[in-house]
């Protein structure tokens, strides 16, 4: 079945077809998709997550009522054991938060603790590859963490009141010392946070806690976005 294809492109085509069917006949298609959330195939579960993402539109549609009722089941896939399924579910959550945040308004608090945890480095997902005289570390959780931080940025823009700012700030501290892609996202989030939360985002750290305002490693060049973030923070302090 193409539904369970190992080829991502094929699954995306299937997901697009499911989107069209779900919009035409949501009463039949969405319950079937919900049943497949617990399918034994990780490829099927990945297809489901992508199909739901494609089904979301900015305009109101007759599928919205059923989506609202069933979205917790679909987004439960962010807790899936498969990394790819987690990523697709996070991308779907991000898409919903951007285009139709009302669908997750009542249940967002259920997903945030999971996202905060997933945004941290998981040593179990770091694989060291022996290249003879060199050793190279591959972080299999990087894409998951990037998806989490992208969600945080979107939520700050669309649903900032539902985010727990102190917890987010702690995650930003860790992210500013992570890989370049994560660091860039953290700078963007920090600038947005300063605009949204103001002084609360710039609070002094408690004992043993790193400050969000800590400088980057002196051995690394400060990215341009970091300089813009610094300007934003200074402006926020003045205001």
Image: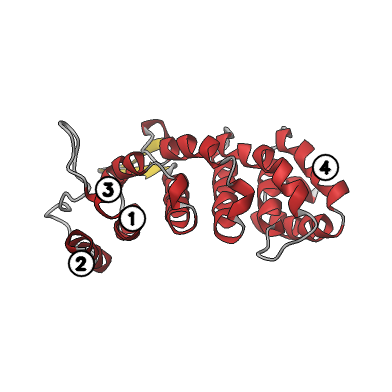
Query: Cα distance, mark 4 to mark 2?
Result: 50 Å
The residue labelled by disc 4 is 32
Return the x and y of residue 117 as percentages of the image width and height.
42, 35
Task: Report the Cα–Cα distance between label 2 and label 1.
Answer: 13 Å
Q: Which residue is mark 1?
A: 193
Q: Mark 3 or mark 4: which is in front?
A: 3
Q: What crowding class fits label 4: few (fewer than 14 Cα within 10 Å), some (14-19), or many (20 or more)?
A: few
How far apart are the two marked residues, 3 and 1, measured between alpha carbons?
9 Å
**In the displayed structure, would residue 234 be above or below residue 68?**
below
What residue sits 80% from the left and 59% below the top?
Answer: 23
Q: Which residue is mark 2?
A: 231
Real-space CA distance between mark 4 and mark 1, rounded to the nearest whole angstrom = 40 Å
91 or 100, which lies in front? Answer: 100
Q: Nearer the viewer, mark 4 or mark 1?
A: 1
Mark positioned earlier in the residue sequence (2 or 1): 1
Q: Secondary structure at mark 4?
A: helix
Q: Are marks 3 and 4 in contact (CB under 8 Å)?
A: no
Q: Earlier in the sequence, mark 4 or mark 1?
A: 4
Number of the label disc, if any, that sits on residue 200: 3
Corner quadrant of residue 70: top right
Tell me the SS state at disc 3.
helix
Q: Earlier in the sequence, mark 3 or mark 1?
A: 1
């Amino acid at each position: 079945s193409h539904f369970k294809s190992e080829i991502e492109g094929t699954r995306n085509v299937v997901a697009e077809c499911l989107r069209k069917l779900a919009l035409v006949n949501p009463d039949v298609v969405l319950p079937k998709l919900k049943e497949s959330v617990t399918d034994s195939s990780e490829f099927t579960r990945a297809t489901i997550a992508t199909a739901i993402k494609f089904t979301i539109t900015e305009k109101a549609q007759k599928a919205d009522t059923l989506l609202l009722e069933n979205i917790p089941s679909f987004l439960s896939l962010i807790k899936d054991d498969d990394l790819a399924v987690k990523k697709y579910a996070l991308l779907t959550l991000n898409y919903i938060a951007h285009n139709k945040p009302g669908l997750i308004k009542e249940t967002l608090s259920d997903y945030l603790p999971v996202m905060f945890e997933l945004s941290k480095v998981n040593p179990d997902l770091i694989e060291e590859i022996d290249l003879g005289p060199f050793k190279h570390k591959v972080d299999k959780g990087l894409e998951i963490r990037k998806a989490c931080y992208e969600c945080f940025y979107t939520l700050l823009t669309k649903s900032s009141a539902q985010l727990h700012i102190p917890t987010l700030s702690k995650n930003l501290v860790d992210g500013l010392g992570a890989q370049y892609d994560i660091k860039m996202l953290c700078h963007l989030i920090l600038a947005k946070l300063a605009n949204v939360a103001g002084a609360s985002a710039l609070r002094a750290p408690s004992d043993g806690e790193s400050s969000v305002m800590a400088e980057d490693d002196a051995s690394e060049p400060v990215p341009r976005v970091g300089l813009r973030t610094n300007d934003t923070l200074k402006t926020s302090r003045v205001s």
